[in-house]
Amino acid sequence: MEYHRHSIRLRGFDYSQEGYYFVTICTYHHECLFGEIVDGKIVLNPLGLIVKHNWIAISNHFKFVRINQYMIMPNHIHGILIVDGVGAGLPRPTSGRGNRAPTLGQMIAYFKYVCAKQIHRIIDNPQLPIWQRNYYEHIIRNEKDYWAIKQYIKDNPKNWERDELFTR
């Protein structure tokens, strides 16, 4: 039997362009690898701290990206990435080699790769998959959407037991 993966991306959309992107990245099989929720707050373990460090570092590696609201949960991360400096008469950012700016997918792939590489250095099973193959993204199109998503991310630890990604 042949398996065909269907893209969940918006057909024809240029994911290297300026915009606000809400991203959710889940661990493999929703394993709780990054910490636990205690009294409605996330307590990150060393693996969760690696994820936090590398999420914040996205803006160091991709100079035209700003990190906005984010939350690392036991088995996933939610975050808003803001891609600036593209459009509005500004030159498109490049990778430094004259190539087109990286897409959102390339940025997420880089983040997942760096996290997995660092996590594998400290766990007993360096073959253990860390991340699910894909990720969820939503293009934030207006201010109302932005504020609702920002609040959702902020409240995620308080709502953990009602979260669709909740596992014990």
Image (cartoon, rainbow, N blue to C red):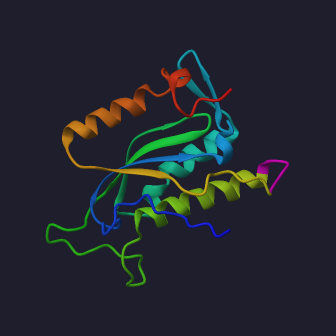
The image quadrant of residue 147 is: top left
Q: Residue at the spot x=41%, y=70% of the render?
A: 102
On the picture, is 113 further left or further right than 129? Answer: left
Residue in front for this viewpoint, 85 or 100: 100
Q: Residue at the spot x=62%, y=59% of the render?
A: 114
Q: Is residue 35 above or below residue 93?
A: above
Q: Is residue 62 above or below residue 69?
A: below
The image quadrant of residue 134 is: bottom right
Residue 162 lies within the magenta run: no
Q: Residue at the spot x=59%, y=57% of the render?
A: 112
Image coords of residue 36 (percent x, y): 64, 27
The image quadrant of residue 19 is: bottom left
Residue in front for this viewpoint, 58 or 78: 78
The quadrant the N terminus occupies is bottom right
Q: Give the range drawn in magenta.
A: 122-126
Image coords of residue 127 (percent x, y): 80, 57
On the picture, is 39 further left or further right than 128? Answer: left
On the picture, is 81 further left or further right than 49? Answer: left
- Residue found at the very far top of the displayed protein: 39
Residue 123 lies within the magenta run: yes
Q: Is residue 166 above or below residue 70?
A: above
